[in-house]
Amino acid sequence: MPVSATFEEFSSGVTPEELPMHLREQAGVVWSLCGQGLFSWSVFKFYTIRLLTASGRFDSTQPYLLDLSYLRKLSAQQIVTISLQEIERLVPPTAEQKASWRQALELIVPDVSLGDRLFGWFKPGEGVHFFSASRTLGAIPDAEFAHAFASIWLDPRTQRPALRQALLGAHDAEK
């Protein structure tokens, strides 16, 4: 897609039923859109993000998917570092957790370019599985990590409260 694509052009693309086959094989095929939004900072647009749940309503005790479509090139190191900084601000991990989570993310997160998609399949109480549009990337079977990572977007104290509200849609059923 061209760099000048609008948010509407991205948001009207792939429907939840059209998730990559390797993701559907593991996570199932029945996912409904809860909400979507655009992550930007200053004048820079980084990605569109969609929250998918089985019911179309968010319940933090039930599995959910985050679907990110990148609007610019980012290195894996940038993604890992920024993610861990935000996790530290919201859900401060121990030094051991932070080191372990950094190592795990560095093994999983790829560099991304315009149009690349990354998915997180969150399984509360178990952990999170990561996918790209073309393959399974890996999993972090740590419930505390999964909660901390999802907090980047879903915690009430997120740096992007409007994005959080957009993701939760009109059905803010967070527990």
Image (tube, rainbow, N blue to C red):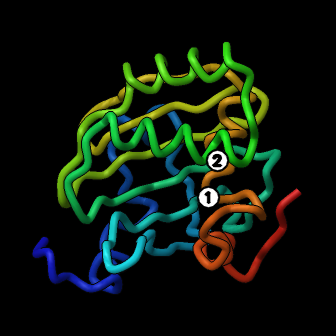
Local packing at callout 1 (Cα closer than 10 Å; few below 14, some 14-19, many 20+) is many
The residue positioned 73% from the left and 83% from the top of the image is: 170
Residue under circle 2? 150
Left or right relative to 29: residue 172? right
Local packing at callout 2 (Cα closer than 10 Å; few below 14, some 14-19, many 20+) is some
Do callouts 1 and 2 mark residues in contact (Cβ within 8 Å)? Answer: yes
Left or right relative to 28: residue 109? left
The residue positioned 80% from the left and 56% from the top of the image is: 59
Residue 51 is tagged as none
Compared to residue 41, the image places residue 16 above or below, namely above
Left or right relative to 13: residue 66? right
Q: Position of residue 32 (x, y in %)?
A: 58, 65
Q: What element carries label 2?
A: helix
What's under tag 1, amino acid-wise? Trp
The residue positioned 44% from the left and 38% from the top of the image is: 81
Q: Position of residue 173 (x, y in %)?
A: 84, 67
Q: Marks 1 and 2, how far apart in space?
A: 6 Å
The residue positioned 30% from the left and 36% from the top of the image is: 76
Q: Position of residue 18 (x, y in %)?
A: 36, 58
Q: Is mark 1 on a helix, strand or loop?
A: helix
What's under tag 2, amino acid-wise? Ala
| Residue 172 vs residue 44, the one in the foreground | 44
Compared to residue 13, the image places residue 93 above or below, namely above
Q: In which quarter of the image is the C terminus?
A: bottom right
Residue under circle 1? 153
Q: Where is residue 120 in the image (x, y as percent from the top left)?
A: 50, 42
